[in-house]
Image (cartoon, helix red, strand yellow):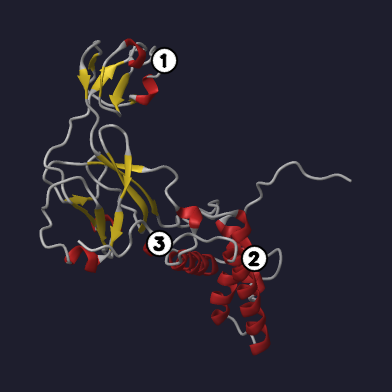
Amino acid sequence: MATGTTANHTLTRNEIITLATQKCGGLSQGSPLSGPQLADGILALNNIISELDMKDNNIWAVSPDPSHLTLVANTARYVTGVTATTIPDNILELINVSYRDEQAEDHPLFIANALDYERIKNKLDQGDPELVYLQPHATLSSQVLFVHPIRASVNTQSVVTGTDALAYRCIRTHTAAAENRPVTGANYNLFWELGGSGAVAWATGTQYAAPQQLRFKYKRPLWDFDLSTDNPDMPRAFGRFLIYALAFDLADDYTLDLDERTHLARKKADAYNTVFGKAQVPKTNTHYNRGRDF
């Protein structure tokens, strides 16, 4: 018996629209989509993607690596942007957040809701952070992250030139010695990571500083279908669900009888249960020390 050797089949945007239009009776097999059919299919398909963003179980749309926010002294409010002291502009929901101190130790933070944050009497209390509150906004790029307490002082991150002539930024405050010199030191990777600007020459005996940061993972929006060749921003097993969900939405444009509509509804429900019964992601209210008083 012969079998394939790959497992990478996935559908494109136009293939999903074509199959969905066929299943709701709008297109015969082998016929091309008309311009209006394609336009309607793109709009309806991206609406389905937007609705999926509201579900708790699209775990594949989690940021792949922790994001970093470098704290600023006496600052409680952080806006979106692309610098080290801003947050990403595509956060749907925070999954976990920790405070990383200058010794690279992580401390889990409480993810507060609006009521939790409102109950804090002095929002400018000083100390190491214990909670964060992401203030929602209809436009993700207008969201604001609030931190409490706030740091009275923070370190400026040291950046040095490694023995390979590249820049390295400090991730753990320390005194320079041969064993932590980038990149020839035996354990330099515990103290330095590649990157940074304004590098200076490394010197033994110098005190190098790491910044105080927040590290977090978050749920982001699923990517839209923009191009005809775009693939779904989700596991390939979701292809059948997208086809039947779209077919059901497009059915209003065609003269399907009750039995045909019921058939599409059942197919959509079956595909939904098959894939969404497999992916679960914890909800925000299961996070660290939920419900504590401040």
Query: Does residue 33 appear in the picture of this structure?
Result: no
**Mark 1–mark 2 CB contact (< 8 Å):** no
Tell me where residue 178 appears, x and y as whole percent: 33, 10
Residue at 17% in and 51% down = 149
* Label 1, residues with CA under 10 Å away: few <14, some 14-19, many ≥20: few
The residue pinned by badge 2 equals 19
Q: Which residue is mark 1?
A: 186
- Earlier sequence position, callout 3 versus callout 2: 2
Alpha carbons under labels 3 and 2: distance apart: 40 Å
Q: Which residue is mark 3?
A: 286
Say which residue appears at 26% left-offset and 63% top-offset: 137
Residue found at x 31% / y 22%: 168
Q: Residues within 10 Å of mark 2 (few under 14, many from 20)?
A: some
Looking at the rendering, which quadrant does residue 30 occupy?
A: bottom right
120 left or right of 278?
left
Look at label 3 and name its amino acid. Thr
- Mark 1 vs mark 2, CA separation in Å: 57 Å
Secondary element under disc 1, as helix, strand or loop, is loop
- Verify CB contact (< 8 Å) between mark 1 and mark 3: no
Q: Amino acid at mark 1?
A: Ala
